[in-house]
């Protein structure tokens, strides 16, 4: 049985650049070796590693370019690296082919020196940057795929165009297109937006989104204002629509600060109680969601937070030292005026001890 070699590529979906490689030991094994290095920030190709760190793993795709006889691997690797260098760009530092690497390194040094001299000319550098930007922008990017917003029927040449139109991250739209998410962002009427890669003559149907069928009015409890949708309220106060909805759903305490510095607290109109105090101050005293009541076992005093106790007994580190006593790492923290050592416990645990 004749063994086959593989030419493979690692493609950056954000800009189309690729890394070309060859293997005779098995495609899966070779890809796993790349992943091991990239995920640990130790890949031998610095250009590829920097791109991986910048865009994130989700923007890279591994695929087989061509299968061939082992003796043809070097020739085909050189061919494919040259092809991508002349089109979209390649992360490879060498021209490819195991037999020609010394010569390639020498050639690249000469090319690099000449290139640096050209790029030192400000006019040349500006012209080339503009040219490269235009070459890979929007629909000029050969890897760009058309996108359709299923809600509106709008077709976009690229994800970037859709992202700008609806103020949604490209990554979120991409996740919808590949099926990792059902929706991304919201229309101005409050309806969640759904996207797909566009194919001519294909019929698109909105997927069911549980819990989001009904558009509910929201109330900004700080002012009592009522908005028809979370999108309207978020727009007025320059907040994230998702944060407003998360606040209404009780998943977060506040959707962000208002112009006067207050933390905004939102609720659905049908759940709003005008007599209730919704005031919230992040990480202040008992408003801190992680704050725990504590008890001084020596005196029997109960404090809402460690900070309160630390202030009363002039204990430094804003209560951090008291936490050591509460977790059993220290027996005592602080003293009474007469020198008596203070013992501490979380309130619930202290009650159990009694």
Image: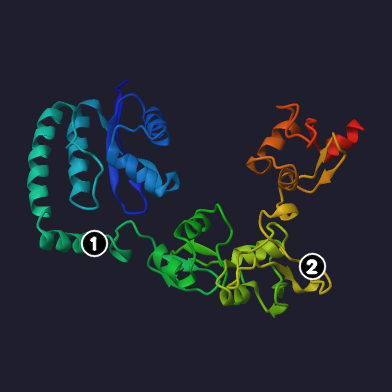
User: Is any atom of residue 156 visible in this view?
Assistant: yes
In this image, 196 relative to 92: left or right? right
| Residue lying at the far top of the rendered structure | 1
**Depth-wise, is mark 2 or mark 1 nearer the camera?**
2
Q: Nearer the viewer, residue 188 or 278?
A: 278
**x%, y% of residue 113?**
9, 43
Q: Nearer the viewer, residue 174 or 26?
A: 174
Which residue is label 2 attached to?
Answer: 277
The correct choice, above or below, for 20 with respect to 152 in the image is above
Q: Give SS at disc 2.
A: loop
- Real-space Cα separation, disc 2 to disc 1, in angstroms: 57 Å
What crowding class fits label 2: few (fewer than 14 Cα within 10 Å), some (14-19), or many (20 or more)? few
Q: Nearer the viewer, residue 19 or 167?
A: 167
Question: Of the residues under marks 2 and 1, which one precedes in the sequence?
Answer: 1
**x%, y% of residue 158?**
38, 64
Q: Give SS at disc 1.
A: helix
The correct choice, above or below, for 331 with respect to 160 in the image is above
Q: What scheme was used to colour the molecule?
A: rainbow
| Residue lying at the far right of the rendered structure | 354
In this image, 71 relative to 123: left or right? right
**x%, y% of residue 212?**
68, 66
**x%, y% of residue 202?**
48, 66
Name the mark on residue 200.
none
Which residue is label 1 attached to?
Answer: 135
Q: Nearer the viewer, residue 298 or 108?
A: 298
What's the residue at 73%, 65% (across, down)? 279
Task: Specify the quadrant that holds the C terminus.
Answer: top right
């Amino acid at each position: 049985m004749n063994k086959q070699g593989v030419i493979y590529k690692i493609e950056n979906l954000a800009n189309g650049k690729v890394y070309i490689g060859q293997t005779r030991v098995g495609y899966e094994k070779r890809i796993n070796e790349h992943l091991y290095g990239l995920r640990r920030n130790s890949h031998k190709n610095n250009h590829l590693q920097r791109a991986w760190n910048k865009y994130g793993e989700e923007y890279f795709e591994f695929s087989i370019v061509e299968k061939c006889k082992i003796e043809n691997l070097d020739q085909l690797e050189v061919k494919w690296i040259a092809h991508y260098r002349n089109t979209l760009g390649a992360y490879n530092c060498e021209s490819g082919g195991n037999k020609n690497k010394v010569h390639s390194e020498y050639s690249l040094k000469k090319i690099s020196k000449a290139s640096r001299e050209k790029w030192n000319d400000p006019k040349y550098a500006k012209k080339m940057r503009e040219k490269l930007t235009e070459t890979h922008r929007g629909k000029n990017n050969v890897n760009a795929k058309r996108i359709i917003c299923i809600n509106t029927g709008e077709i976009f040449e690229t994800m970037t165009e859709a992202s700008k139109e609806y103020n949604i991250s490209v990554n979120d739209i991409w996740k919808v297109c590949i099926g990792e998410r059902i929706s991304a962002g919201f229309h101005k009427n409050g309806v969640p937006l759904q996207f797909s890669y566009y194919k001519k003559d294909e019929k698109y149907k909105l997927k069911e989104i549980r819990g989001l069928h009904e558009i509910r009015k929201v109330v900004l409890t700080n002012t009592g204002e009522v908005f028809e949708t979370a999108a309207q309220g978020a727009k007025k106060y320059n907040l994230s629509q998702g944060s407003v909805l998360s606040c209404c759903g009780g998943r977060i305490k506040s959707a962000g600060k208002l112009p006067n510095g207050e933390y905004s607290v939102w609720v659905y109109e049908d759940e709003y109680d005008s007599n209730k105090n919704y005031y919230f101050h992040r990480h202040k005293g008992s408003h801190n969601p992680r704050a725990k009541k504590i008890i001084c076992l020596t005196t029997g005093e109960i404090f809402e937070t460690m900070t309160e106790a630390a202030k009363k007994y002039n204990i430094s580190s804003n209560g951090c030292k008291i936490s050591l006593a509460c977790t059993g790492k220290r027996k005592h923290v602080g003293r009474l005026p007469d020198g008596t050592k203070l013992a501490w416990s979380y309130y619930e645990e202290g009650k159990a001890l009694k």
